[in-house]
Image (cartoon, rainbow, N blue to C red):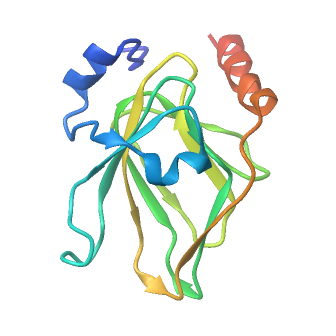
Amino acid sequence: MKTTDKIYNQADFETANVFGTGNPNTAFAAYFTGNSYLNPLTEMGKAPVFLANVSFEPGCRNNWHIHRAAEGGGQILICTAGEGWYQEEGKAPVSLRPGMVVVIPPNVRHWHGAKADSWFSHIAFEAPGRELSNEWCEPVTDEEYGCLAAQEGSQK
């Protein structure tokens, strides 16, 4: 049984990341701690859903955020390489590995990103709906994030 999908260096990550790392995610850099990368898989406006492969360097995570919708909406993550974290406000964090799918309901405050010692990527898309918007909140603090590594170490 495989015990880890962690990818420690970028060269190995580039091989495992079958959807491609893409370019630095400069348009949204203000909403991330660390460096993220974006590789669009569909062209916005030319497909019914915009799909993008989002890659995170070790320790990178996005801020708390909410995908708002009056009807429908939410976000779906399809984990593709490395290991990461997902957490909804008020709930325990979820360890992410390739092949996992996370369905995030609309109007739920959450964050996601790489583990401290692994590269990570997921395909992300916003579910169709009405009156969709994204509300960016404050960063996940180093203290909040640091507790995850300690928690993971105590479960081994």
- Residue 45 found in image quarter: bottom left
Out of 84 and 41, give the one closest to the viewer.
41
Please tell me whether residue 126 is drawn above or below residue 24 in the rendered image. Answer: below
Q: Position of residue 86 (x, y in %)?
A: 58, 43
Count up the numbered dots. 0
Q: Position of residue 80 (x, y in %)?
A: 31, 38
Q: Is residue 85 visible?
A: no
Out of 99 and 54, give the one closest to the viewer.
54
Q: Position of residue 91 (x, y in %)?
A: 74, 48
Please tell me whether residue 45 is drawn above or below residue 1 in the rendered image. Answer: below
Please tell me whether residue 129 is drawn above or below residue 27 in the rendered image. Answer: below
Left or right? Give the position of 78 relative to 85.
left
Please tell me whether residue 24 is drawn above or below residue 101 in the rendered image. Answer: above
Residue drawn at point x = 65 percent, y = 19 percent: 152
In the rendered image, which quarter contains the C terminus?
Answer: top right
Left or right? Give the position of 112 relative to 22.
right
Q: Position of residue 92 (x, y in %)?
A: 72, 41
- Residue 148 found in image quarter: top right
- Residue 106 found in image quarter: bottom right
Residue drawn at point x = 42 percent, y = 52 percent: 77
Residue drawn at point x = 31 percent, y = 54 percent: 52
Out of 147 and 10, give the one closest to the viewer.
10
Left or right? Give the position of 14 relative to 10.
left
Residue drawn at point x = 53 percent, y = 46 percent: 29
